Image (tube, helix red, strand yellow):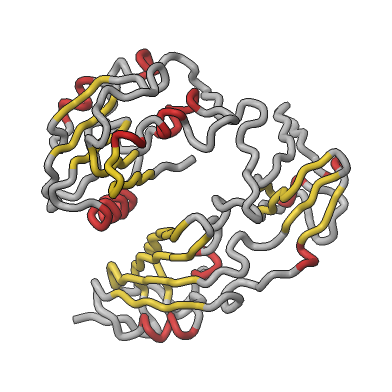
Amino acid sequence: MRKTDGNSLAAVEFQLQWKSDHGTHTDCLFAEKVNFWLDIFPKPLFEKLLNRSVGDCVEQSFGAGEILPGPDPSKQFRIRHSQFEGSFRTGTIVHPRQGRFYPKGILKDIANVFRVNIEPFRCAQVKDSGILVDFSHPLCGKELHVKAAVRDIMTRTAGKSGTCNDWMEILTAGPGMQVRWNGQPTDFFSDTPFARSDEQTDEQFYEKPRFVNHLDDTAIAAVSGLYGRMLHDGDRVLDLMSSWTSHLPSGLTLKNVTGVGLNPEELKRNERLTRAVIHDLNEKPVLPFDDASFDARPVGDNLHRNSSQWSGKFDRPPGFRGVAPYIKHRGYHRIKNRI
């Protein structure tokens, strides 16, 4: 049986786990070609990945500051509003909003920052007197736990030259940005950030069936695995904004699965549904079910279509707040989406 060594080329599935004040987060990354000869790993993780077969999984924890720089007060400083260049040649105008991330290149007159710099920074505070920016990594000061599963070991077809990847740098690029800065609410509601490019009604948009996957096979497997860990045999599941597939694992025996969607043909094609309900959440946020009718509620790739329900008065769409009574107290919501 082939095993990994210092010259291997392998496909590795990474999971990065970390905690915030809101919960435990897991970010997944599928690396198709990990070059054990060229690529960079923390030494403890690299050593654990050696002499592994396909299907083996290793884990390594890192304390705060081991992978990413620790807190540095000098990375938080104030700038003038005139240093935030939010006007672009395309006519787009971007305004600084509290808690939001922007590319550093949008700033001017900052040492070592150039227009082409896309590394994100955060507008921590936005006041009339100026803007407090935070150049710290979003996971700064966090303990990190990494899981790495070997999915394939490939034969090297060329020499030892190629691109060198720092996999911890890649794995930590993005995670952490979803968490509030110092517990302060992020300004998502100024202007019209949830306006849709296609503002036709959902009834019109979903008039024709779309039998396509919005996730690739690797992402679907990750979502299915998450559902398999969080759901239980015998659960009553509410599949909100459902379509022709629910990504529920085949080995899970559920009592019933109720799909709420807008296209009858798509719902009819979904083999996991025991009941299909045509219901427009944007028009009618209140669902036609009795209280405590379900044990869990996954939400798939159509979360962005619920945009008209967002309002600055709510932390979540009323359609989501309205669904809470239908879930038993031991139940939970699981949301997967890309916005």
Is 155 placed above or below 296 here? Answer: below
Q: Quadrant of the N terminus?
A: bottom left
211 left or right, relative to 319: left
Q: Determine whether, in the image, residue 257 is placed left or right of residue 96.
A: left
Q: Viewer-proximal residue, 15 or 119?
A: 15
Query: Relative to 309, does residue 57 appear above or below in the rendering?
Result: below
Image vertical order of residue 71 relative to residue 243, above or below: below
What's the residue at 85%, 38% (across, down)? 128
Q: Which is nearer the eye, 166 or 292? A: 292
Q: Which percent across, then down, holds residue 190?
A: 66, 30
276 sits left or right of 34 in the view: left
Q: Residue at x 70, y 40 (%)?
A: 97
Q: Quadrant of residue 74?
A: bottom right
Q: In x, y percent, where is residue 13?
A: 35, 65
Residue 264: which quarter of the image?
top left
Q: Residue at x 72, y 48 (%)?
A: 123
- Is residue 164 visible in the rendered image? The answer is no
Count of numbered circles in the view: 0
In this orientation, does residue 313 appear? Answer: yes
320 and 224: which is toward the camera: 320
The residue depicted at 69 percent of the width and 70 percent of the height is: 71
Please state the horizontal and vertical placement of residue 329, each as a whole percent of the image. 30, 45
Determine which quarter of the picture holds residue 304. Answer: top left
